[in-house]
Amino acid sequence: MKIEELEEAEESTFISKFGHSMSKEMLTKDAIHAFQNIIYAYYQNHGRKLPWRETNNPYHILISEIMLQQTQVERVLEKYGEFIKAFSDFHALAQASLHNVLEVWQGLGYNRRAIALKKIAEIVVTAHNGTLPSHPEVLMSLPGIGRYTASAIAAFAFNLPTVFIETNIRTVFIHFFYQNQSKVKDSELLPLVEQTLDTANPRTWYYALMDFGAMLKKRFQNPNRRSAHYHRQTPFKGSNRELRGLILKALTRQTSMSERELVQTLILDPERIKSTLKQLHAEGFIKKSGNTYRIA
Protein backbone atom coordinates (compact mmCIF):
# COMPACT_ATOMS: atom_id res chain seq x y z
CA MET A 1 0.00 0.00 0.00
CA LYS A 2 1.07 3.59 -0.62
CA ILE A 3 1.83 5.86 2.35
CA GLU A 4 -1.35 7.86 1.69
CA GLU A 5 -3.49 4.72 1.67
CA LEU A 6 -1.98 3.53 4.95
CA GLU A 7 -2.62 6.93 6.50
CA GLU A 8 -6.27 6.91 5.42
CA ALA A 9 -6.71 3.37 6.73
CA GLU A 10 -5.34 4.41 10.14
CA GLU A 11 -7.71 7.38 10.18
CA SER A 12 -10.71 5.17 9.45
CA THR A 13 -9.69 2.69 12.14
CA PHE A 14 -9.30 5.46 14.70
CA ILE A 15 -12.65 7.08 13.86
CA SER A 16 -14.51 3.76 14.06
CA LYS A 17 -12.85 2.91 17.39
CA PHE A 18 -12.60 6.24 19.19
CA GLY A 19 -14.33 8.94 17.16
CA HIS A 20 -17.95 8.32 18.15
CA SER A 21 -19.47 9.60 21.39
CA MET A 22 -15.98 10.59 22.54
CA SER A 23 -16.56 14.31 22.52
CA LYS A 24 -18.46 14.29 25.83
CA GLU A 25 -16.02 12.02 27.63
CA MET A 26 -12.42 12.11 28.74
CA LEU A 27 -10.31 10.53 26.03
CA THR A 28 -8.43 7.42 27.06
CA LYS A 29 -4.63 7.36 26.97
CA ASP A 30 -4.84 4.88 24.10
CA ALA A 31 -7.06 7.24 22.10
CA ILE A 32 -4.77 10.22 22.71
CA HIS A 33 -1.70 8.20 21.80
CA ALA A 34 -3.31 6.85 18.61
CA PHE A 35 -4.51 10.31 17.58
CA GLN A 36 -1.10 11.91 18.12
CA ASN A 37 0.59 9.12 16.18
CA ILE A 38 -1.66 9.70 13.15
CA ILE A 39 -1.08 13.46 13.16
CA TYR A 40 2.67 13.22 13.70
CA ALA A 41 3.08 10.46 11.08
CA TYR A 42 1.42 12.67 8.47
CA TYR A 43 3.55 15.65 9.48
CA GLN A 44 6.73 13.61 9.22
CA ASN A 45 5.85 12.54 5.68
CA HIS A 46 4.12 15.67 4.36
CA GLY A 47 4.87 18.60 6.69
CA ARG A 48 5.11 21.98 4.94
CA LYS A 49 8.46 23.76 4.92
CA LEU A 50 7.63 27.35 5.83
CA PRO A 51 10.24 30.01 6.68
CA TRP A 52 8.57 31.10 9.94
CA ARG A 53 8.74 27.49 11.14
CA GLU A 54 12.51 27.50 10.79
CA THR A 55 13.08 30.20 13.40
CA ASN A 56 12.41 30.82 17.08
CA ASN A 57 12.73 34.58 16.62
CA PRO A 58 9.62 36.09 18.31
CA TYR A 59 9.64 39.10 15.96
CA HIS A 60 9.63 36.90 12.86
CA ILE A 61 6.87 34.70 14.27
CA LEU A 62 4.79 37.75 15.21
CA ILE A 63 5.09 39.04 11.63
CA SER A 64 3.98 35.70 10.21
CA GLU A 65 1.02 35.36 12.57
CA ILE A 66 -0.29 38.84 11.83
CA MET A 67 0.18 38.26 8.09
CA LEU A 68 -1.61 34.92 8.26
CA GLN A 69 -4.73 36.49 9.75
CA GLN A 70 -7.36 36.08 7.01
CA THR A 71 -4.66 35.58 4.36
CA GLN A 72 -3.64 32.37 2.58
CA VAL A 73 -0.20 30.89 3.18
CA GLU A 74 0.81 31.29 -0.47
CA ARG A 75 0.29 35.06 -0.37
CA VAL A 76 2.13 35.39 2.94
CA LEU A 77 5.10 33.50 1.52
CA GLU A 78 5.42 36.22 -1.12
CA LYS A 79 5.63 39.02 1.45
CA TYR A 80 7.10 37.57 4.64
CA GLY A 81 10.77 37.66 3.59
CA GLU A 82 10.41 41.05 1.91
CA PHE A 83 8.87 42.58 5.03
CA ILE A 84 11.55 41.26 7.38
CA LYS A 85 14.28 42.38 4.99
CA ALA A 86 12.79 45.89 4.98
CA PHE A 87 12.18 45.99 8.75
CA SER A 88 14.61 43.60 10.41
CA ASP A 89 13.47 43.93 14.03
CA PHE A 90 11.16 45.80 16.39
CA HIS A 91 13.39 48.89 16.42
CA ALA A 92 13.52 49.11 12.63
CA LEU A 93 9.74 48.74 12.33
CA ALA A 94 9.06 51.24 15.10
CA GLN A 95 11.26 53.86 13.43
CA ALA A 96 9.86 53.31 9.91
CA SER A 97 7.26 55.64 8.44
CA LEU A 98 3.76 54.28 7.99
CA HIS A 99 4.10 55.14 4.30
CA ASN A 100 7.04 52.76 3.96
CA VAL A 101 5.30 50.05 5.97
CA LEU A 102 2.16 50.20 3.82
CA GLU A 103 4.29 50.25 0.68
CA VAL A 104 5.92 46.95 1.61
CA TRP A 105 2.59 45.55 2.85
CA GLN A 106 0.84 46.15 -0.49
CA GLY A 107 -0.74 42.97 -1.82
CA LEU A 108 -1.67 41.42 1.53
CA GLY A 109 -4.87 43.38 2.09
CA TYR A 110 -6.51 44.12 5.45
CA ASN A 111 -4.15 47.07 5.87
CA ARG A 112 -5.22 47.62 9.48
CA ARG A 113 -2.78 44.83 10.29
CA ALA A 114 0.13 46.92 9.00
CA ILE A 115 -0.79 49.78 11.34
CA ALA A 116 -1.19 47.29 14.19
CA LEU A 117 2.26 45.82 13.54
CA LYS A 118 3.89 49.24 13.59
CA LYS A 119 2.09 50.15 16.84
CA ILE A 120 3.11 46.82 18.37
CA ALA A 121 6.74 47.52 17.48
CA GLU A 122 6.55 50.96 19.07
CA ILE A 123 5.04 49.53 22.28
CA VAL A 124 7.55 46.66 22.45
CA VAL A 125 10.46 49.09 22.08
CA THR A 126 9.19 51.68 24.57
CA ALA A 127 7.47 49.49 27.16
CA HIS A 128 9.22 46.10 26.91
CA ASN A 129 12.85 47.01 26.10
CA GLY A 130 12.52 45.62 22.57
CA THR A 131 11.53 42.12 23.74
CA LEU A 132 8.16 40.63 22.83
CA PRO A 133 6.26 39.44 25.94
CA SER A 134 5.59 35.70 26.10
CA HIS A 135 2.42 35.58 28.21
CA PRO A 136 -0.79 35.43 26.17
CA GLU A 137 -2.64 37.87 28.43
CA VAL A 138 0.07 40.50 27.92
CA LEU A 139 0.19 39.81 24.18
CA MET A 140 -3.56 40.37 23.99
CA SER A 141 -3.07 43.92 25.25
CA LEU A 142 -1.16 44.76 22.06
CA PRO A 143 -2.97 46.17 18.98
CA GLY A 144 -4.41 43.65 16.54
CA ILE A 145 -3.75 40.63 18.77
CA GLY A 146 -6.73 38.59 19.93
CA ARG A 147 -6.79 35.40 21.99
CA TYR A 148 -5.98 33.07 19.08
CA THR A 149 -3.01 35.11 17.83
CA ALA A 150 -1.68 35.60 21.38
CA SER A 151 -1.90 31.86 22.10
CA ALA A 152 -0.32 30.96 18.76
CA ILE A 153 2.60 33.34 19.29
CA ALA A 154 3.13 31.92 22.79
CA ALA A 155 3.24 28.39 21.38
CA PHE A 156 5.30 29.05 18.26
CA ALA A 157 7.76 31.62 19.61
CA PHE A 158 8.09 30.40 23.19
CA ASN A 159 6.90 26.75 23.00
CA LEU A 160 4.30 27.36 25.73
CA PRO A 161 1.46 24.78 25.96
CA THR A 162 -1.42 27.13 25.21
CA VAL A 163 -4.81 25.86 24.07
CA PHE A 164 -6.28 27.45 20.97
CA ILE A 165 -8.20 26.72 17.80
CA GLU A 166 -8.19 28.03 14.23
CA THR A 167 -9.69 26.89 10.96
CA ASN A 168 -7.31 23.98 10.21
CA ILE A 169 -7.23 22.73 13.80
CA ARG A 170 -11.03 22.95 13.92
CA THR A 171 -11.18 20.90 10.73
CA VAL A 172 -9.09 18.10 12.23
CA PHE A 173 -11.20 17.69 15.36
CA ILE A 174 -14.50 17.86 13.49
CA HIS A 175 -13.21 15.20 11.07
CA PHE A 176 -12.05 12.79 13.78
CA PHE A 177 -14.61 13.31 16.52
CA TYR A 178 -17.76 14.78 14.93
CA GLN A 179 -18.44 12.68 11.87
CA ASN A 180 -21.86 13.38 10.32
CA GLN A 181 -22.59 16.22 12.76
CA SER A 182 -23.12 19.89 11.99
CA LYS A 183 -23.13 23.21 13.88
CA VAL A 184 -20.24 21.98 16.03
CA LYS A 185 -19.20 24.66 18.50
CA ASP A 186 -15.61 25.51 19.41
CA SER A 187 -16.59 25.09 23.06
CA GLU A 188 -17.14 21.41 22.28
CA LEU A 189 -13.78 21.09 20.52
CA LEU A 190 -11.51 22.96 22.93
CA PRO A 191 -11.59 20.24 25.65
CA LEU A 192 -10.40 17.77 23.00
CA VAL A 193 -7.67 20.17 21.87
CA GLU A 194 -6.52 20.45 25.48
CA GLN A 195 -6.62 16.70 26.17
CA THR A 196 -4.63 15.78 23.06
CA LEU A 197 -2.07 18.61 23.31
CA ASP A 198 1.56 17.52 23.26
CA THR A 199 2.57 19.70 26.21
CA ALA A 200 6.24 18.84 25.79
CA ASN A 201 6.37 20.25 22.26
CA PRO A 202 3.26 22.32 21.50
CA ARG A 203 5.04 24.22 18.72
CA THR A 204 5.56 21.16 16.51
CA TRP A 205 2.23 19.64 17.53
CA TYR A 206 0.22 22.64 16.36
CA TYR A 207 2.17 22.82 13.11
CA ALA A 208 1.33 19.15 12.55
CA LEU A 209 -2.36 19.72 13.31
CA MET A 210 -2.53 22.68 10.93
CA ASP A 211 -0.94 20.73 8.10
CA PHE A 212 -3.28 17.81 8.63
CA GLY A 213 -6.25 20.18 8.56
CA ALA A 214 -5.02 21.83 5.36
CA MET A 215 -4.81 18.38 3.77
CA LEU A 216 -8.34 17.45 4.89
CA LYS A 217 -9.78 20.55 3.23
CA LYS A 218 -8.33 19.37 -0.07
CA ARG A 219 -9.35 15.74 0.33
CA PHE A 220 -12.94 16.37 1.45
CA GLN A 221 -15.55 19.04 1.01
CA ASN A 222 -14.21 21.35 3.72
CA PRO A 223 -15.18 19.71 7.07
CA ASN A 224 -14.92 23.18 8.63
CA ARG A 225 -18.28 23.99 7.01
CA ARG A 226 -19.86 21.84 9.71
CA SER A 227 -18.63 24.26 12.35
CA ALA A 228 -21.13 26.58 14.04
CA HIS A 229 -18.54 29.32 13.45
CA TYR A 230 -18.14 28.86 9.70
CA HIS A 231 -18.72 31.96 7.58
CA ARG A 232 -18.13 32.20 3.85
CA GLN A 233 -15.86 35.16 3.10
CA THR A 234 -17.55 37.92 1.13
CA PRO A 235 -16.21 38.52 -2.42
CA PHE A 236 -13.24 40.89 -2.58
CA LYS A 237 -14.02 42.29 -6.04
CA GLY A 238 -16.06 45.46 -5.72
CA SER A 239 -15.96 45.38 -1.92
CA ASN A 240 -15.09 48.20 0.44
CA ARG A 241 -11.89 46.27 1.25
CA GLU A 242 -10.85 46.48 -2.39
CA LEU A 243 -11.54 50.23 -2.55
CA ARG A 244 -9.60 50.90 0.64
CA GLY A 245 -6.66 49.00 -0.80
CA LEU A 246 -6.82 50.86 -4.09
CA ILE A 247 -6.81 54.26 -2.34
CA LEU A 248 -3.89 53.34 -0.11
CA LYS A 249 -1.98 51.91 -3.07
CA ALA A 250 -2.51 55.15 -5.02
CA LEU A 251 -1.36 57.26 -2.07
CA THR A 252 1.77 55.18 -1.53
CA ARG A 253 2.76 55.89 -5.14
CA GLN A 254 2.23 59.66 -4.83
CA THR A 255 3.32 62.18 -2.21
CA SER A 256 -0.26 63.41 -1.93
CA MET A 257 -3.49 63.37 -3.95
CA SER A 258 -6.74 65.29 -3.84
CA GLU A 259 -10.13 63.61 -3.70
CA ARG A 260 -10.72 64.68 -7.30
CA GLU A 261 -7.39 63.18 -8.44
CA LEU A 262 -8.28 59.92 -6.74
CA VAL A 263 -11.64 59.82 -8.48
CA GLN A 264 -9.96 60.45 -11.84
CA THR A 265 -7.29 57.82 -11.15
CA LEU A 266 -9.55 55.07 -9.83
CA ILE A 267 -12.54 55.84 -12.09
CA LEU A 268 -14.99 54.81 -9.37
CA ASP A 269 -18.06 56.28 -7.68
CA PRO A 270 -17.04 59.66 -6.17
CA GLU A 271 -19.38 59.21 -3.20
CA ARG A 272 -17.84 55.84 -2.31
CA ILE A 273 -14.35 57.31 -2.55
CA LYS A 274 -15.36 60.27 -0.38
CA SER A 275 -16.89 57.99 2.27
CA THR A 276 -13.89 55.66 2.24
CA LEU A 277 -11.46 58.57 2.59
CA LYS A 278 -13.34 59.65 5.71
CA GLN A 279 -13.04 56.13 7.13
CA LEU A 280 -9.32 55.88 6.40
CA HIS A 281 -8.74 59.33 7.91
CA ALA A 282 -10.69 58.46 11.07
CA GLU A 283 -8.73 55.22 11.46
CA GLY A 284 -5.36 56.95 11.16
CA PHE A 285 -4.29 55.52 7.81
CA ILE A 286 -4.20 58.89 6.04
CA LYS A 287 -3.90 62.57 6.87
CA LYS A 288 -5.71 65.47 5.24
CA SER A 289 -4.04 68.80 4.49
CA GLY A 290 -6.30 71.28 2.76
CA ASN A 291 -7.80 69.40 -0.19
CA THR A 292 -5.13 66.69 -0.37
CA TYR A 293 -4.55 63.36 1.34
CA ARG A 294 -1.38 61.47 2.13
CA ILE A 295 -0.35 58.41 4.09
CA ALA A 296 -0.20 59.25 7.80
Image (spheres, rainbow, N blue to C red):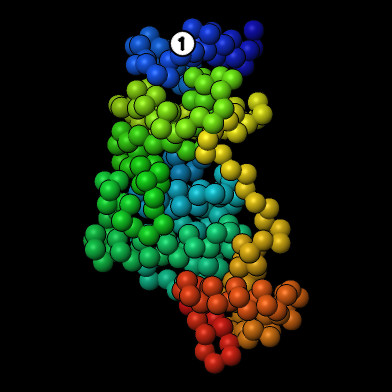
Q: Residue furthest right?
A: 267
Residue 153, given in percent of the width and then of the height, sits at: 37, 45
| Rendered image quadrant of residue 24 | top left
Using the rendered image of the protein, determine whether residue 59 is visible from the camera's viewpoint: yes
Residue 177, above or below 246: above
User: How many residues crowd around disc 1 within 10 Å: few (fewer than 14), some, or many (20 or more)?
Assistant: many
Residue 240, given in percent of the width and then of the height, sits at: 63, 64
Q: Residue furthest bottom?
A: 290
Residue shown at 52% from the left, 21% from the top: 178
Horizontal relation, residue 158 to residue 235: left or right? left
Horizontal relation, residue 261 to residue 37: left or right? right
Residue holding disc 1: 18
Horizontal relation, residue 38 to residue 269: left or right? left
Residue shown at 51% from the left, 77% from the top: 281
For the residue pair 107 and 163, the one nearer the viewer reads as 163
Residue 197, given in percent of the width and then of the height, sits at: 36, 26
Residue shown at 64% from the left, 7% from the top: 1
For the residue pair 288 and 255, the one nearer the viewer reads as 288
Identified by mark 1, the residue type is Phe
Count of numbered circles in the view: 1
Residue shown at 44% from the left, 33% from the top: 186
